[in-house]
Image (tube, rainbow, N blue to C red):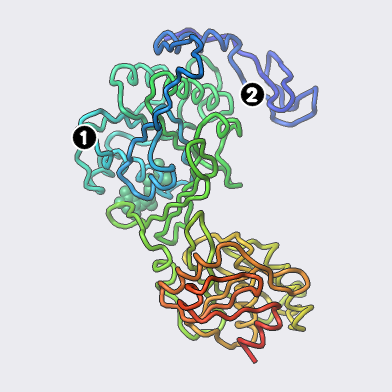
């Protein structure tokens, strides 16, 4: 479409400009921070603006209509929940996650479950061939005439198709594969991602057609490319899970149109992703009963109290340095709690390896599981099981005191619903009479007190 534009290399940390690429910014000294940018950025915005003109006159605030914003129901309950009730017109959403976690599957399923069966949906794939997408859709049992697939990576062609089809929503799978002819750099570079995303978001805002971007993540777990991408979009979701397990958690880390507290839980099965209505049941389904080192805790995910099994294995160390290995639980937190166990309970863990795992591939990062971690390490060390009908709630301080946690009542009613009969809670946490009737509540003040209760 347009001929190659004049570009310049700009340091992403200090803004230094250079006509050619440099490995290190001579101004601020940062390494590989120079990224190519189009000089005439305004001219580009203009070209998109010509294709999708907007009203640019200022409006009196009193004249702006304030009817409740329209939300497009995605047809997938858990996805709606995370988005805050559906997709807002013109919204730009970014979904990040490890390769193979199910991002493409989720969005293809969403395309098929949108209640409107007539308006076109444009699925743009830069990663897979049309045939691969067709095979996936057959596996998912999708047969919808209004889903249009475009396998294309050139931004200019993509924009032309959006203009031609005028879909109700368009999906970019993935933003790292798209490139504009205006930049000399290859797809996936900082400058390409930023330029392409900004033009597509402009189109979404100008037309009111929502866009969903799929984004790859780096080894560190962040969306690859410029951090600015996350600032540009309205909503950022992360799709997480362990590939060895069927459970997937969709989490909002940024949401201009809703809370960032909600999570959606899915199960990946033969025919795609299924909503999980009762996650606690799923996470506890394979729990061993009356086995040392297994304890059930409650982690509040958004407004949902999930019941999760923690497992610990404490064994004699063969190395000078004992190992502390954790999966799904913060490593530093466990090291700290091990130290508290040693100091306050006199438990000799210096020559023991400690392994801790949150079963089912979930991640827990709430202080309310501290007391459960302590109980489960002690249980494995002493080789004494914790009663299977017991759940343990509480934060642990450095002096071994048990501190209050939020939303105890919600957690207790979830535990009672799942058939638990006893619950250890912090003494500070107050409960209304109704909740005390649901379950036998045992308040404790210190880890010593809990220890007496469980193992004496
Ligand atoms: P995919 O959506 O391609 O992942 P992403 O786009 O995040 O890279 O999902 C790929 C995985 O999902 C693959 O390992 C196979 C599995 N899968 C199922 O188990 N069931 C299904 O119905 C589908 C379509 C995929
Ligand atoms: Mg994919």
* Residue behind mark 1: 117
Picture quarter containing residue 454?
bottom right
In the displayed structure, 51 sits above or below 387; it is above
Q: Residue at x 74, y 19 (%)?
A: 16
User: In the rendering, at what x and y percent does residue 301 appear?
Assistant: 51, 57
Looking at the figure, which quarter contains the N terminus?
Answer: top left
* Horizontal arrangement in the rendering, residue 140 relative to residue 188 (left or right): left
What mark, if any, has residue 205 been given in the picture? Answer: none
* Horizontal arrangement in the rendering, residue 16 relative to residue 441 (left or right): right
SS at badge 2: strand
Judged by depth in the image, the label closer to the viewer, 2 or 1, is: 1
Ligand 2 placement by image quarter: top left
Is residue 172 visible in the rendered image? The answer is no
Is residue 395 visible in the rendered image? The answer is yes
User: In the rendering, at what x and y percent does residue 278 appear?
Assistant: 38, 63
Question: What's the distance in space between the residues labelled 2 and 1, CA to CA?
Answer: 43 Å
SS at badge 1: loop
Disc 1 crowd, CA 10 A, few/some/many (<14, 14-19, 20+): some
* Residue behind mark 2: 35
Q: Residue at x 44, y 61 (%)?
A: 244
In the displayed structure, 41 sits above or below 434; it is above
């Amino acid at each position: 479409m347009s001929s190659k534009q004049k570009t310049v290399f700009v340091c992403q940390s200090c803004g230094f400009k250079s006509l050619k690429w440099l490995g290190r910014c001579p101004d601020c000294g940062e390494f590989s921070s120079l990224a190519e940018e189009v000089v005439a950025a305004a001219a580009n915005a203009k070209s998109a603006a010509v294709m999708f003109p907007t009203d640019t006159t200022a409006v009196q605030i009193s004249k702006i209509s304030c009817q409740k914003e329209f939300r497009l129901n995605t047809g997938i309950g858990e996805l709606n929940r995370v988005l805050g009730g559906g997709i807002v017109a013109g919204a730009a959403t970014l979904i990040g996650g490890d390769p193979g976690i199910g991002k493409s599957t989720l969005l293809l399923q969403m395309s098929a479950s949108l209640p409107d069966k007539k308006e076109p949906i444009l699925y743009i794939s830069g990663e897979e061939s049309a045939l691969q997408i067709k095979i996936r859709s057959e596996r998912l049992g999708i047969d919808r005439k209004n889903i249009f697939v475009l396998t294309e990576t050139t931004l200019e062609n993509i924009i032309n198709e959006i203009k031609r089809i005028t879909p109700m929503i368009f999906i970019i799978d993935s933003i790292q594969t798209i490139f504009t002819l205006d930049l000399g750099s290859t797809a996936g570079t900082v400058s390409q991602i930023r330029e392409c995303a900004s033009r597509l978001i402009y189109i979404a805002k100008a037309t009111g057609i929502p866009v969903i971007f799929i984004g790859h993540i780096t080894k560190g777990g962040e969306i690859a490319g410029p951090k600015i991408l996350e600032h540009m979009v309205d909503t950022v979701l992360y799709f997480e899970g362990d590939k060895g397990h069927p459970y997937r958690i969709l989490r909002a880390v940024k949401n201009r149109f809703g809370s960032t507290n909600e999570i959606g839980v899915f199960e990946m099965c033969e025919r795609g992703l299924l909503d999980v209505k009762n996650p606690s049941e799923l996470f506890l389904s394979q729990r061993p009963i009356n086995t040392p080192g297994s304890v059930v805790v409650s982690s509040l995910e958004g407004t949902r109290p999930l019941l999760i099994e923690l497992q610990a294995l404490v064994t004699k160390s063969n190395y000078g340095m004992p190992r502390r290995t954790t999966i799904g639980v913060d490593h530093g937190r466990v090291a700290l709690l091990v130290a508290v166990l040693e100091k306050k309970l006199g438990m000799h863990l210096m020559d023991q390896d400690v392994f801790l795992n949150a079963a089912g591939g979930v991640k827990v990062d709430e202080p309310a599981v501290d007391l459960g971690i302590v109980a489960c390490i002690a249980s494995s060390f002493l080789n004494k099981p914790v009663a299977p009908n017991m759940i343990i709630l509480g934060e642990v301080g450095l002096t071994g005191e048990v501190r209050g946690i939020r939303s105890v009542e919600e957690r207790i009613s979830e535990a009672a619903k799942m058939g638990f009969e006893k619950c250890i809670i912090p003494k500070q946490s107050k409960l209304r009479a109704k909740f005390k009737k649901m379950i036998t509540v045992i308040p404790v003040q210190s880890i010593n007190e809990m220890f007496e209760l469980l193992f004496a």
